Amino acid sequence: MAGLEAETRLRHAQPERIFVLNDLPNTFRNQPDERGHFGDFGGRYVAETLMPLILELEREYRAAQQDPAFQAEFDGLMEHYVGRPSPMYYAERLTEELRKDAEPGMGAQVWFKRDELNHTGAHKINNCIGQILLAIRMGKTRIIAETGAGQHGVATATVCARFGLPCVIYMGAEDVARQSPNVFRMKLLGAQVIPVTSGGATLKDAMNEGLRDWVANVHDTFYIIGTAAGPHPYPEMVRNFQSVIGTEARAQLLSRTGRLPDLLIACIGGGSNALGLFHPFLDDPEVKMLGVEAAGHGLDGDEHAASLLGGAPGVLHGNKTYLLQDEDGQITEGHSISAGLDYPGIGPEHAWLKDTGRVEYTAVTDDEALEGFQLLCRTEGIIPALEPSHALAAVAKRAPQMREDEIICMNLCGRGDKDIFTVAEKLGVEM
Amino acid sequence: MTRLQNAFSKPHAAFVAFITAGDGDTAANLDALVEGGADVIELGMPFTDPMADGPAIQAANLRSLGAGTTTADVLQIAYDFRTRHPDVPLVLMGYANPMIRRGPEWFAEAAKNSGVDGVICVDIPPEEDDALGPALRAEGISPIRLATPTTDAKRLPQVLEGSSGFLYYVSVAGVTGLQQAAAGSIEEAVAALKAATDLPVAVGFGVREPAQAAAIAKHADGVVVGSAFVDLVGEHGAKAPAKLKELTAAMVDAIKAV
Ligand SMILES: Cc1ncc(COP(=O)(O)O)c(C=O)c1O
């Protein structure tokens, strides 16, 4: 049954698409190479002081991967602390709503992987659990992290409290002002939040400051990077910890629908929730994938955060990837209504997946994301974060163009409690 | 002998002076460093995200970019310097992205045409040498690498491989401008480096006072000072050249007295 459906779909596909697929490597799941390169991207572009540490981190990570006790501890915390597996939910009313504007027989079924139900309200905790276990295994006694919206900062502060390690969070001064509830959460959890005033005082500057701290404290400090970017092995490691999302989703969809989904959709800041969902499906050719970047005020201007669609390859924060930059290689500030997508780079594996054509990328504006946000509140009784609201806007565009029997699975990677103030302001509501 | 070899063949340790291009009147500031007696000039290429630098050089980067400095401007500053000072070696120091933006070959050729002798790229370790090293070597420009307190004996040969000009020993694990290393640890580290290479070893990070420069000059082939100069540029603006010349002369006198 599943095979037959897949064949039908392939016959519906565009001929050039099939040609491209035949030209592709026979697996998409064995990246990066031993130097941490995803094709031309990735790598270890760090100062010499950090290089020996990065190599040690890689050795320790490889050892942990081979250690059943490490995996067992990760799995145990995922189940009992984070609350996994997260549900796979058929969004029936949203599906019906989107069919209203579709041709007869059209309007794909929309399913959500509900990582917004995780402890701390987003997928970020999956990665933090993995990395803090590694930090403890390496004997590190101090944790640092960068944060934009504060979700990764909260998740890091959470695992530090859980394991009793001191925690320093670097956060752009602009973001500290914009995201005060999360700043207070981090402080409640015992973290020290350091506002970063250098540069534009947002996420990339927080990451610079994290790297500066790390260079000065390499002997005892572990840097928990919050997305699938940074020097090797971070992009691979973060992807692997987040792949719990896609591994669960694949099994859940197979058991609930008897087949694989037709389209996966996820929003992209640095790319960790998207890779977490996509990676376990990369070698299923019938599963298409769509990554959604933040188009801010529109891709035609400078006010967006779409590194893949509006940037060019370059080197920043330890890896080669697509970046928002000018013709001299100076990094430009991104803009998005969602602080979690407001980063001028993207994980290097996405850069590779884009260039190979395996994953399609699109971008969604602030206004479209706001509509997606409200649509989900109204139709399903779920308040999403502004980040996955971008993915929702893409779902709303794609579902009506797909057949009724087709399945979209979207990563609902965060809940919107943190964003209600931003949304109220945008909608002109006094709180 | 190349200009760099020449600078490191003097009877005293070479004095290496760093300022950021496009921050203040760079031509006048560079001339002041030379007049004060600097043996090697390190010209910083400004970058929006200087993640290995402390507050002083970060601020210099922002001042320079705020004034509209472009890559073409940096190359022009180097070219004009070379015209005025045919014998003083000039090294560009900066981050990978501005260097490879138009392709490594483009950058290496442009640097060559501007009379640049060497390039220090902070965030291209030997593991990623392909990104820039081959292009520099093809143009006869020295790729100058950094060794740090975390670079152990096993790793050192890899750091030395394909590098030339001199070896830059970053004496503290940290960013530029903040701490200073203990003299004892520098002596030991320099001895270990010199046992592994014939390249001159220059030591920097956290050197602000002539006495510190002299202590380093006892053991190393060169002393690098950056943040102290950059602070003077930030503080004194158009009046910086006199201050730069004064500090350089004091550093050079202390080094020569060793
Ligand atoms: C809920 C949520 N989704 C997505 C992101 C973007 O990160 P990534 O692309 O790594 O998933 C963030 C970042 O803060 C987030 O909080």
Image (cartoon, coloured by chain):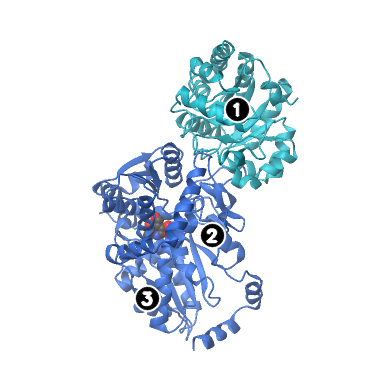
Chain colours: A blue, B cyan
Judge the density around disc 1: few (<14), some (14-19), many (≥20) Cα neighbours within 10 Å: many
Q: Chain of mark 1?
A: B
Q: Position of residue A84 (x, y in %)?
A: 32, 68
Tell me if residue A297 can be seen.
no
Asked whether disc 2 touches disc 3, contact meaning CB atoms under 8 Å apart, the reply is no
Mark nearer the viewer, 3 or 1:
1
Looking at the picture, tell me which residue is in the foreground, B119 or A298: B119
Q: Position of residue B50 (x, y in %)?
A: 51, 38
Query: As displayed, is residue B44 above or below residue B133?
Result: above
Q: Position of residue B35 (x, y in %)?
A: 63, 14
| Mark 2 vs 3, N-terminal side | 3
Looking at the rendered structure, the kind of residue marked 1 is Val
Instruction: Name the residue that disc number 1 marks.
Output: B201
Q: Chain of mark 2?
A: A
The local secondary structure at tag 1 comes to: strand
Looking at the picture, tell me which residue is in the foreground, A185 or B150: B150
Quadrant hosting residue A151: bottom left
The local secondary structure at tag 3 comes to: helix
Instruction: Name the residue that disc number 2 marks.
Output: A349
Looking at the picture, tell me which residue is in the foreground, A295 or B256: B256
Q: Position of residue A56 (x, y in %)?
A: 47, 48
Looking at the rendered structure, the kind of residue marked 2 is Glu
Query: As displayed, is residue B253 above or below residue A374?
Result: above
Q: CA distance from mark 2 to mark 3?
A: 31 Å
Judged from the image, the quadrant occupied by ligand 1 is: bottom left
Looking at the rendered structure, the kind of residue marked 3 is Leu
Instruction: Name the residue that disc number 3 marks.
Output: A94
